[in-house]
Structures are given as structure tokens and as C-alpha cells.
Amino acid sequence: MTDFTVIGGGIGGLVVARRLAMAGRAVTVLEASDHLGGTVARHTVAGLDLDAGAESFAIRGGTVAALAAEIGLGNQVVAPSSMGAWLHPVSGPAVPLPDAALLGIPGTPLAADVIAVVGGAAAFRAQLDSLIPALWARQSLTLGQLVRRRMGAAVLERLVAPVVHGVYSIHPDKLSIDRVAGLRHAYSQQGSLAAAVRSLRSAAPAGSAVEGIRGGVHRLVTELAADLETYGAAVEFDRRVTALEGLPGTVIVAAPGIVAPVAGRNVVVATLVVDAPELDAAPRGTGVLVAQGARGIRARALTHSTAKWEWLRERAEGKQVLRLSYDDEPENLAETARTDAAALLGTDLPPTAVLDFARVEWTRPAALTTPTDHIVVGETVGGSGIAGIVAHAERTAAALLAP
């Protein structure tokens, strides 16, 4: 007899299924594909096992680190390099992203690294945020609306929009301020947007806002799957569910497109493994975010993975791993990725330098905004990051197990 049926073996489905199985419940996971993990996936490029999807997770709340410890990966959680990322603007040379910022929102608008990105006039306009009364704190606003009103359009478009687009694949005008943990509360308490950013940053643990897993975040899936087997949960592959009626036990939807249309967006990730010794110096830190409309660049972001993760640099043995993200896939992805990487990193990267290439496409589902009677976990309700998905799945399991 099945107590719970979990539809979808992505990270949210695996977490909720594991927690229920640990409590002695009979759990069955129905996965439409032939593998678990969803966008937390692995692929092999130039002999290196790499993350094909998510390669880090937010440290907020410590939820993912706690899960990693439970499944035997506690000593494998690692921080990325302390080198910052860069911004490739619409015009002009690449510049380092400001240090004291949150999603590009400057905590100190007149700082030199902010002026280098947006210019003196725009930085002065952003400084007026400290003089404007703390209006709109209770309104339903997007992040773009709030930044535009408080700091001006130039800071929004030149600094905040490229960062938000790199993280969420959308413009700040389409991102609710409530998707940014703690921002609304901090803004209402501090009285200005810059002060809210400083408050949130000071309250955060020292160091990077993200962490990874030595060997790749995909190792979470391997260990979660092993735990499902240990605790007696059943996993059925190639089981595409189109209707919820007739499924045994309490049904938990952990896959998009079942209780609401996917209505999402596609993201293509191009991975290049290259022989380019000059990149050992990490000329653009851990990577580059690209301002929308930047001339001659099709990618929206580049991650220099071997500069970002020390464990990968060691395993790559001199090779460089580059990941480029595209919203609109170019006709010749491999060639465009090579030329984009060369331009973004400011180095020569001839075709002979490319040792291997891989393409992965992910569909990012839209958030589930309409009420539903169904129990749902995963990206549609937990957000686009692993930390949010895991935290929501843990809360869901706890509620289902509550007496």
C-alpha cells in the first residue's frame, strides 16, 4: 500500500520523498525520464564530470548544507573563489561588479566601483535614495519598479538588470521584490533601498553567498537516490503522468506542467573545455554577466568554472572549463560560444584551443501564482534556486508528517 505518490524526481521531489520515507511512510516516486535530478544533472566533457545544470546553491538558512551533511556530503561542501565577477556593459570595457551590492543594487551608490559601472550622474541620482521617504514598502511591486523609483533608471538598466538577468533569466520588472529574501522587510525597517542592502549584507555570514559540492552539485542526487533505496521508497522511471486521478495515496506534484501549464522559458548552456594557459590568471574573476544589448555578444552570462571552483581547477589539470548561458540559441552554438568567450574574457581563443563542447537545454517553468488544492513542490513554488526548493520541500514534508 502506497501512502504517498510523488510525481517527479527532481530535487524537490527527491527531498520530500526521502523525508517521508525516513518517517516510515510507503513512498513511490514516478519519474517521466530515465534518470533522477531534473536540472541538478551531470555530464562528461573532455573527460571531466561536470554539473550540467545548477552548480551552486545559496547558503541562506543553511538548508542545503544541512541536507548534504545528512546524506554524507557534509565535508564536501565548498565555497567558491573569493574573486568577484565582472560586468560586460552595453558599451565600453568590462568592469568588476561592485562589492557592496545585492543583485546589483548598490549599498553605497557613490562608491568608486559603482561609478565605474553607471557613471557619476547615475550614481548621484542613486544616492538620492537616502533622501526619499520610504514609500511603497507595502505595495505589490517588482524589483525593477522599486529600484527605478528609488535609484533611477540608469542604475536599474546598467547594473541591476544584468545581474538579475544572469541569476533569474528575467528582467527586474518581472521579478517580485518578495522573491528577494528579506528585502521588503529590510527596506521598510531601514527607510532606504541602499540601507536595506547594507543591512541584509551585514546580517549574512561572511564570505560568499553561495556554496557548491566538491565533485559537483549533482552528487546530491546520487546520495538522495541512495537514501530512497535505503528507506524503502520505490522509484519508477519512464512514468509520465498526465492525470492525477487514480494514483494511490496522497499525491505530491513535483513536476511542472501537471497542475498548471509550464509557460516557462528555455535556457541553453554551452560548456567549453579549452586549452588556454593565459586563463589561469582568471582575467574576469569567476565570470562575466552581460548587459542586455551588449554589442557583438549573444551570451547572457559566462562562468569561468575552473576559476570559480578550486576542486575543479585541480581535476582539470591545466584545462579551462567555461559555461555560457543563452536565452536565444544561436544557429552555430559551439562557434558562437567560442567567440563570445574570447570577447568576454579579453583573450584570443582560436578553434584549435577548444578540446570539447557540450550543449544542454533546460526549461525553466513559470512560478505557480494561482491557488491550487494540490500539494506542490519544486521550482514552480520554491523558486529557481536549489536552496529555495529544498527548504520548501522540507517544510512540505514536515507539514504532511505533522500529527
Image (cartoon, rainbow, N blue to C red):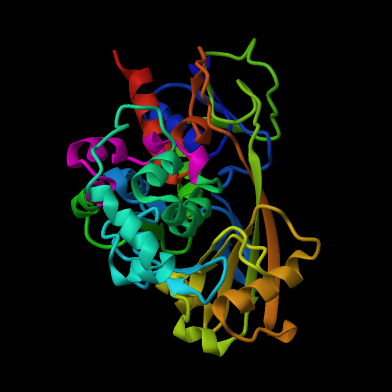
Which secondary structure dominates the residues rendered in magenta?
helix
In this rendering, would 141 be left or right of 126?
right
In the image, the segment drawn in magenta is: 172-197
> Residue 189 magenta-drawn?
yes
Q: Is residue 188 left or right of residue 166?
A: left
Q: Residue at x 68, y 42 (%)?
A: 34
Locate residue 124 relative to residue 173 in the image: left or right.
left
**Above/below status of 58 relative to 246:** below
Image height check: is 318 above or below 157? below
Q: Quadrant of the C terminus?
A: top left
Residue 163 lies, in percent from the top left, at 46, 56
Q: Residue furthest bottom?
A: 277
Q: Is residue 398 magenta?
A: no
Going by the image, does 282 lie left or right of 115? Answer: right
Q: Position of residue 67 (x, y in %)?
A: 35, 44
Residue positioned most to the right = 331
Residue at the spot x=51%, y=36% of the render? 379
What percent of the width, then of the height, locates residue 201?
Answer: 24, 53
Task: Work out whether residue 274 can be spotted.
Answer: yes
| Residue 382, image quadrant | top left
**Residue 176 on image: x %, y %:** 44, 35
Q: Does the image show residue 77?
A: no
